[in-house]
Image (cartoon, grey):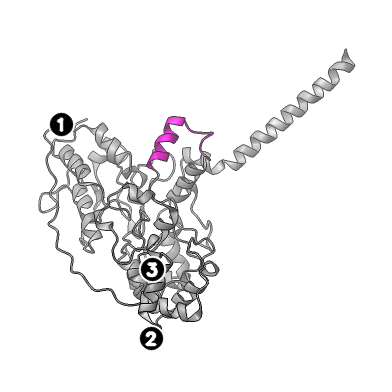
Amino acid sequence: MALRSLPLASLAGVFILVATAGGGFVLWRDADVLALRMPTRVLAPTQRTPESPRDAVEHFQCNRCHVVPGIEPTSARMSENCVTCHQAISAGRLDLWYQKAELQKWNEHLTHLVRTPDLGSLGQRVKRGWLTSWLQAPHVVRPLYGATMPRMKIGPKEAGLLADYFQVTGEESGEPARGDAAAGRALYEKNACASCHYRGDSPLESLRYGAPEFLGPSARRRAPDLRHVRSRMSLSQLRSWLVDPSSILPDTEMPTFPFTPKEVEDLATFLREPLPEVAAEPRSPYRPRMLQREVHYPEVAQKLSRHLCFHCHSDMTRPGDQGPGNTGGFGYEGVSLDLATRDGILRGIKRDGQFRGLPDRMEDGTPRLVASLLARHREMDGQSHPGVLGMPMGFPPIPDEEIDLISTWIEQGAPE
């Protein structure tokens, strides 16, 4: 009997060993996923004024959204990085550790920040003057990307330091494009460039956070609006891109077309033609409507605060990162704003050492929280309020009916 049981005992030992090793591998593989449930360090500015290019990259937390070569970590941990977390959800990396209902809800809401531009070859794709100006007053470059550069607290010096870090030095040489613009237009149409690109005709001003247009084909979402080509790229950069885009940006979805040198020049000439300026009709500021029903916190949480706002505004009791809207980031000091709970919303932001509570009204009587949601609409029109940051920062404005909802809730006294 002992002789017969020995192989079984050995097999059992092998099985236990393999199971232990396998379990250890899974824990090692998913360590970043498990860290989502744990407290994390505060990813916030550590000094008031960056003095070097590396200081600037760390101060403005470029690795919170982007992969940044040359710093450690090149990309912030999943608990501090919206993009890598969203990518992990899409890839099924959280399936083992979270409930099916949670995963289903998250996948349904994954519209924004599913990827961000590669910064490794930035110096081959944009002009320095454009970049430093754009960092200080960002506008939408990719209309269907679903996110844009946040409006950071940044001046000319800091913008120059960021350009230095990414080795963006190119400017316009003054050489004119010498092609045939009409022939370039014909090439543009023949190669169906408009199937991915807009050229000053995007529907951006009508799009709101979560719009289905942001879920279109990847190539369409990543494609920049070509109305900005002249200001954004030098002629030499544009030529190089048209010849072989994948040599500049390996993961680009822009095809490499077999253009002749003349066709490259014709297309570059057409793309650099200034578009006629169409004066936009000024839109009257939106005034939230008072809903004719009582609004309670669970509805506000479901549609806004626990769906969107808490990602950047949470308190220290929440596992993971508390977000730049609480501990500080993008050049701003922390205001300890917690939008993950009703109590946190009632407490409000911390200003001059005191929590201001709700509604914390502006001079015109608008609650500050509502004013920030309205300000994001104006920012998309190229206007900014010196004392109010538009929210959600870096995203399209939320729909008017959701502003009505939270405004009504506040004016009703924020019922539970």
Secondary structure mostly seen in the magenta stretch: helix
Between tags 2 and 1, which lies in front?
2
Disc ID at residue 86: none
Residue 97 lies in magenta, yes or no? yes
For disc 1, the marked residue is 294
Does the image show residue 26?
A: yes
Could you tell me how far apart the alpha carbons at marks 1 and 3 are, in whole angstroms?
Answer: 54 Å
Q: Specify the amino acid type for callout 1.
A: Glu
Could you tell me how far apart the alpha carbons at marks 2 and 1 are, in whole angstroms?
Answer: 63 Å
Identify the residue at image location x=47%, y=73%: 242
The image quarter containing residue 386 is: bottom left
Between tags 1 and 3, which lies in front?
3
Q: Specify the amino acid type for callout 2.
A: Pro
For disc 2, the marked residue is 176
Q: Which residues are magenta?
A: 94-109
Q: Specify the amino acid type for callout 3.
A: Glu
